[in-house]
Amino acid sequence: MFDYLSELGVPDETVSLFLAIFIGSITISLLIALVFYLFESIGVCKMAKSAEIKNPWLSFVPVARNWVFGTLAEKYKKKNGVKSARFGIILTVLSVIELVCAAVMTVFMIIVTKDILGVAYDAAESSTEVTPEQLAALIPIIIIYFVLIAVSIANLIITYIAMWRIYSSFDKANATLYIVLSVLFSISAPIILFIIRNRKPEFDPNSNMPYFSGTFKA
């Protein structure tokens, strides 16, 4: 792909600099992502153990960690005693769809980008314009992109709902603050989950109500 840049007249020094910046940025981003991934995985794993969920170590495994996270949220009971939705299954399915769409779109983008750069080079050599028909290869990418966006939004919304239930179970007093911080600053969620991992869970809100607070006398 970068050979086309040289063929289009871009200096080799510029291409090398661009490649170095690109690789450096990707490497730093991956390292940061790995740190936050471990924070969240450790937090969810410890919480899953407290909730007696089977195979809590799956919180370290991509995709499978969504099942552990969702199952942990399922432990939460509403005020009427009704259990939560099947977050484990829903989040796992959505994450699989999201992963497949992202992989397919990445492959298409690599192939199409190379083709478009080739077309651009040929057009520059022959002093012609790139026609709309030559850009038609972008259509599948656009369709997959919108599907990926829709699935990602659904996954994000359900994840935040499940996250609030987990926060409420492990630190009810600060659950609202935690979810607001998680929505506004997504990197805060792994840190919060890591911090509250050792708290004792209370999955039933009714158990927190002060029925025998001393206000009732016989």
Image (spheres, rainbow, N blue to C red):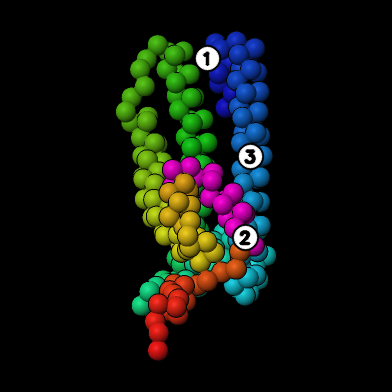
- Residue depicted at 46% across the width and 72% down the height: 208
Residue 197 marker: 2
The span picked out in magenta is 183-198
Q: CA distance from mark 1 to mark 2?
A: 54 Å
Q: Position of residue 26 (x, y in %)?
A: 62, 33
Could you tell which of marks 3 and 2 lies nearer the N-terminus? 3
The kind of secondary structure the magenta stretch mainly shows is helix
Q: Where the N terminus falls, by quadrant?
A: top right
Could you tell which of marks 1 and 2 lies nearer the N-terminus? 1
Q: Residues within 10 Å of mark 2 (few under 14, many from 20)?
A: many
- Residue depicted at 51% across the width and 30% down the height: 114
Amino acid type of the residue tagged 1 in the rendering: Leu
Determine if the magenta segment contains residue 135.
no
Residue 32 marker: 3
Q: Is residue 153 visible?
A: yes
Could you tell which of marks 1 and 3 lies nearer the N-terminus? 1
Residue that badge 1 annotates? 8
Q: Is residue 160 visible?
A: no
